[in-house]
Amino acid sequence: MRAAAILMLAAAPVAVAAQPTADAAWRLAWSDEFDGSVIDRGKWDFEVDCWGGGNNERQCYTDRPANAALRDGKLIITARKEAMTGPAFPLSQRGDPEKAAAEATKPFTSARLVTRGKAAWTYGKIEVRAKLPQGQGTWPAIWMLPETSHYGSWAASGEIDILEAVNLGVRCDECVGGIENRILGTLHFGGQWPANKHKGDETALPAPLDGFHVFGIVWEKGKIVWTVDGKPYATRVASEWSTSGSGDPAAPFDRPFHLILNLAIGGGLAEGRGTKGVDESGYPKNMEIDWVRVWQCDGDDVSDCGNMEGQDE
């Protein structure tokens, strides 16, 4: 792993409190501990639309405190059962006047926070300590998209899904114990849609199902390892993904990516599993994030920095 490069796009540097490290070669490059009274808009922006994420999801994303706020040292993303009307397309598509004027109405509201335009990274260790909601139709995610479409539109420039989970706690005949307890780590790559491809792995979420866990990746040139509570459960290497015609075997995962935290309701993956559809009972539902930390390796290889087990307390 080469010395990890960080791209900070905020107008002014963001101070990062010192954190203990398991190995001096790992350096904390960026973090949010959510200890303030309001979400730091110098670190996070919000998607505001009723697009449905391209997956027929059932929520409008807002920037309201009702859907995302800090409480007791945590970021709380709240999905609410309430109808809302808003932009039918994401901001990236609203340069088209017809799309800019189009509206959609959805039966739920939630939030999607992004570091796009504020912080993005190429390589490093990204970790998020979070507590995930349960119920048929819930779809919390911690993931990354490229800062620019260097290799082309989705998914030619890549997507890194650090954590996805759908329908946690719901009856699941193929799951150990008979309830949904799986988490997913996935890469999207290949050509532009619909010539896109993906590769991923699933693992059982460690007990307790309703507790906090640390979800992460260790990302180096040509290799990405997924972890939960500091333990690896999946690995992808460059020979498994497309090079997007760049000539660099690490492409498209050799460019800066920004971070996304969101709680979707419904959509193809969630509604196609479990007991199908969306169970509308039990709302509001929360995704709680204790902290987000981005570490970078000052050595020439990730092995120089160690696996940092025990650092996540």
Image (cartoon, rainbow, N blue to C red):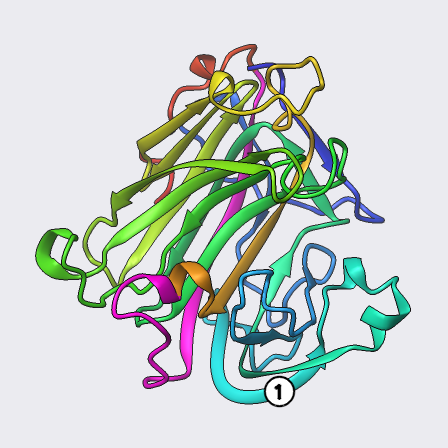
- Of residue 72 and residue 43, the one placed in the foreground of this image is 43
Q: Label 1: how many residues lie within 10 Å, few (<14), some (14-19) or many (20+)?
A: some
Across and down, in percent, residue 252 comes to: 64, 28
Check disc 1 and report its element: helix, strand or loop.
Answer: strand
Q: Residue furthest top?
A: 300
At x 35%, y 62%, the residue is 272
Q: Is residue 245 left or right of residue 265?
A: right
At x 72%, y 62%, the residue is 41
At x 48%, y 70%, the residue is 76
Across and down, in percent, residue 162 comes to: 46, 43
Q: Is residue 213 left or right of residue 9?
A: left
Q: Is residue 72 left or right of residue 313?
A: right
- Which amino acid lies under the numbered mark 1 shown in the image of this protein? Met
Residue 282 is a magenta residue: yes
State which quadrant residue 18 falls in: top right
| On screen, residue 107 above or below 36 | below
| On screen, residue 115 above or below 151 | below
Total numbered badges shown on the rendered structure: 1
- Of residue 235 and residue 218, the one placed in the foreground of this image is 235
Q: Where's the N terminus, which quadrant? A: top right
Across and down, in percent, residue 72 comes to: 45, 71
Magenta residues span 271-298
Across and down, in percent, residue 24 comes to: 49, 22
Q: Where's the C terminus, which quadrant? A: top left
At x 49%, y 16%, the residue is 239
Give the residue at mark 1.
84
Residue 115 is a magenta residue: no
State which quadrant residue 102 falls in: bottom right
